[in-house]
Amino acid sequence: MLGAAVLGAGGAVLGMAGTARADGARHGGGPGNLPRPTIIGHRGASGYRPEHTFGAYQLALDMGADIVEAGDLVPTRDGHLVCRHEPEIGGTTDVADHPEFAGRKKTKLLDGVSTTGWFTEDFTLAELKTLRAVERIPANRPHNTLYNGRWEIPTFEEVLRWQDEQTRRRGKRVWIYPELKHPTYFRKQGLPLEERVAKLLRKYRKDRRTSPVILQSFEPTSIQRLHRLVDNPLVVLLSSADSRPWDFVETGDPRTVADLVKPAGLREIASYARGIGPTLDLVIPRDAQGKLTRPTSLVSDAHKVGLILHPYTMRNENPFLPADFRKGMDADAYGDVFGAYRAYFATGIDGVFTDQPDTGLLAREDFNG
């Protein structure tokens, strides 16, 4: 019943937003041609289906998302790229239920954090294909557990083929927004991501400035490397202000995200990237009670140097919303997400990642009048 309701809502939104999307598709060009604020399906429609599955990707498109974040890219032992939020897959697959893989459980240092579980780089692609995806946050999304075990782990190459198929079927360009995960970590293991991504994009002729593939990473040097390999739109992801990108930690660069969002840092990013993907708290900070305060100057500062902003992540459930937009105490109950969208859209952001694309599209319709 939930799925039917969601698709019904998505169908209504699709009809409202279709003209703008089609216009952008006809004119081609980069992400600036998409409707604004651009609605990006975060790991697909992950509010309704287990993330990074073709079920989640397909639903995001059916709902009318302008872009689908199809692929957090991590490698297999034999060098294939697969779509998982993290290389550790204990929380997003049924690997723990496979006794044949019990011996693969390990503790590793992942970007300085001790992490225990099963890691994609310890499996061949054939082995990973025997696993099935499960809901990552079942306490917040018990309804998604209905779909546990339904879908396998997709490869990036399968995503590129799916993109072509959906473009043909729908008669308009389908955009994807893959992220390269932990590139320094994997490069040190002899599994560099950037060259593998570039090779596949070239194979499918999607390595151009106007190709409907935006690439993103939390590591600025990874984006700089991609800038030399492909012509795709590139985006630097930015975490909390006091954090340091892991490649900076490894190379001894003392700068934090707070330095990168200053005008000088943004100018440097604009020399090799098309945009930034800041956490929403960099756009509007929260106070000690978790309520929104005044917007920062990040949006105007980024726009001054020609950068687009696609912050992350809007989610409907209470725990993920600013405190002033929560309703009740239930972890899986929806708060006043439309009010939160209004506050963020009013800052002038160019788009937003959302786990519920249908909600984002309705919020955009409200905002644009």
Image (cartoon, rainbow, N blue to C red):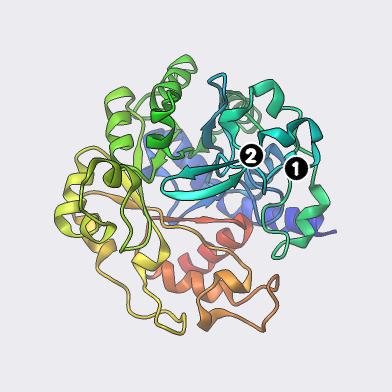
In this image, 155 relative to 212: left or right? right
- Give the mark nearest the N terminus, 1 or 2: 1
- Residue 315: mark: none
Q: Is residue 91 visible?
A: yes
Residue at image x 39%, y 27%?
Answer: 194
Nearer to the camera, 78 or 270: 78
- Quarter where residue 208 is shown: top left
Nearer to the camera, 175 or 217: 217
**Residue 160 in picture, x, y percent from top left:** 56, 26
Give the labeled residue for mark 2.
Answer: 118
In this image, 353 relative to 15: left or right? left
Q: Amino acid at mark 1?
A: Ala
Residue at image x 71%, y 25%?
Answer: 127
Image quadrant for the N terminus? bottom right
Is label 1 in contact with label 2 (beta carbons under 8 Å)? yes
**Residue 139 in picture, x, y percent from top left:** 72, 65
Placement of 248 over or under 325, stated as above or below: above
Q: Callout 2: few (<14), some (14-19), or many (20+) C-alpha neighbours within 10 Å? A: many
Nearer to the camera, 362 or 312: 312
Nearer to the camera, 150 or 65: 150
- Residue 96: mark: 1
In this image, 296 relative to 160: left or right? left
Q: Callout 1: few (<14), some (14-19), or many (20+) C-alpha neighbours within 10 Å? A: some
**Residue 359 in picture, x, y percent from top left:** 61, 62
